[in-house]
Image (cartoon, rainbow, N blue to C red):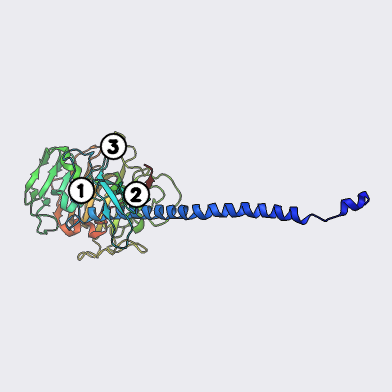
Amino acid sequence: MNMRTRLTDERGVALPMAMMMLMLLTTLMMAFGVLAQSEPVIAANQLRVAQARALADSGLERGIWSLTNAGVAGGIANPLPLTTPGDNTSYAVAPFNGATFMAGDSLTNGGFMVAIRNEQGAGADPNIREITSVGWTPTSNVADGKPKAHRQVFVKVQIIPALAKEAPCALCVKGALQAKGNGTVNGNNSDPSCGGNNKYGAYAKDSVSVSGSPTIQGGAGGYAQNQPASNFEGFMYKNSALDTLKKLAKMNGTYFGPGFPNGGFVSDGSTTWSGSMDFSSSNAVGNGIIFVDTTDGQNLDPNGTNTSTLATLSIHGNPFTGQRVSGSTLPNVPVSSSPADAFSGMIVTNGTINMSGNMTVHGLVYAVNDFSYNGTGNGGLWGQVISQNIRDTTSTSVDTNTSGNSQVIFNCQYAKGFDMIPPGFTVVPGTYRERTD
């Protein structure tokens, strides 16, 4: 056989090829065999992880429900009952102490442990709670030899203070108050949903100066002055509440601030604005939540001194339409009875409010800084007025002249802002996250 024939002869190739294919198939079979053993374990682990994450979220929902429903079985009181009373760093009493396993129903495999405490850190908001929830599947019992999985999630929730119930007055001033003229400040309350008839007409951190012939009365007395600053903390809006009110005002088309110098629902793209707004017959505004913001849209530091960004809202003449803003997505606000152009809702300003004239307001008026009111005719404020005096540049005043006829009359339902504010605890945006051990 010549060399050419030897090189092209294919006899004997089948056996080596068969051996090579057999080795390859054997390797593949071994790999598939390993996968057949590991993949079910991986899939089971993934299932347990997903179940644990879902259970952790269920624990958050249980915590929020319990905080919101304090008066029913399974609810948790406000202020928060702590495991160690007086220690604001401790968690709530069981079952919300982070050590009590709460099993799901008969269809749920596993359960969760929930820990609730007050917000921690400098400048903590007493109206914010921190919730940590750990979901376990199938159990958290270390003595149980079954494979387990757990996931931990965290969120902050807040409740906007119910000022109509919590504030002890028709006119609350975290500063000094001047009352002149022939005005009326009446804190009498006949609505049990705002507590008993135990509110003052006026309540001030500093002195109350009275001249002329004003009438100041209430179930608890006419006025209380020189009250401790701490007494105001429970019914003053903190930054998280102000931010929520800004969002609600944007939903109502009545937010005035950077990007929204004329209100409305769409930003004009600007980043700052003058901080000054004037409501009058030529610039009337509708019902709902009105929010006038600082020049830069940032809330004021309660410990700071800067006054350059303060907003100023002036209300005079015939400034209210008495109607909803077209396109508002807030709950319906009833139209005030008389007059037809009365305002119904909330007026909040990140600064100072100056009101004058014969307008009628049914609702809550809240000034982060100062408030002044010079009423005339039959107009007045029925609801509640809060002046936070965060910079305390001037005294809050009712009738700066002796001929004024201002009226501030407490009305529980109006002071609630017609229930436009969420009544329970809601998630603080941007705080939800999954945590590692």
Q: Which residue is mark 2?
A: 145
Provide residue 52's location: percent of width, then percent of height: 36, 53
Task: State whether residue 378 appears in this view.
Answer: no
Could you say whether the residue bearing mark 3 is in a helix, strand or loop? Answer: loop
Whole-number angstrom distance, CA of label 3 to CA of label 2: 39 Å
- Residue toward you, 363 or 237: 237
In the rendering, which numbered label is found on residue 94?
A: 1
Disc number lying in front (3 or 2): 2
Disc number lying in front (1 or 3): 1
Q: Earlier in the sequence, mark 1 or mark 2?
A: 1
Provide residue 293's location: percent of width, then percent of height: 33, 47
Whole-number angstrom distance, CA of label 1 to CA of label 3: 23 Å
Q: Earlier in the sequence, mark 3 or mark 2?
A: 3
> Cβ–Cβ below 8 Å for labels 1 and 2?
no
> Amino acid under label 1?
Ala
Whole-number angstrom distance, CA of label 1 to CA of label 2: 26 Å
- Crowding at label 2, few (<14), some or many (≥20) Cα neighbours within 10 Å? few
> Amino acid under label 2?
Gly
The residue that appears at 9% across and 59% down in the rendered structure is 190
- Residue toward you, 60 or 420: 60
Could you say whether the residue bearing mark 2 is in a helix, strand or loop? Answer: loop
The residue that appears at 35% across and 42% down in the rendered structure is 298
Task: State whether residue 164 appears in this view.
Answer: yes
Q: Which residue is mark 3?
A: 121
Could you say whether the residue bearing mark 1 is in a helix, strand or loop? Answer: loop
Provide residue 64's location: percent of width, then percent of height: 27, 53
> Amino acid under label 3?
Gly
> Cβ–Cβ below 8 Å for labels 3 and 2?
no
Provide residue 395's location: percent of width, then percent of height: 19, 39
Q: Earlier in the sequence, mark 1 or mark 3?
A: 1
- Crowding at label 1, few (<14), some or many (≥20) Cα neighbours within 10 Å? some
Quadrant in which the C terminus appears: top left
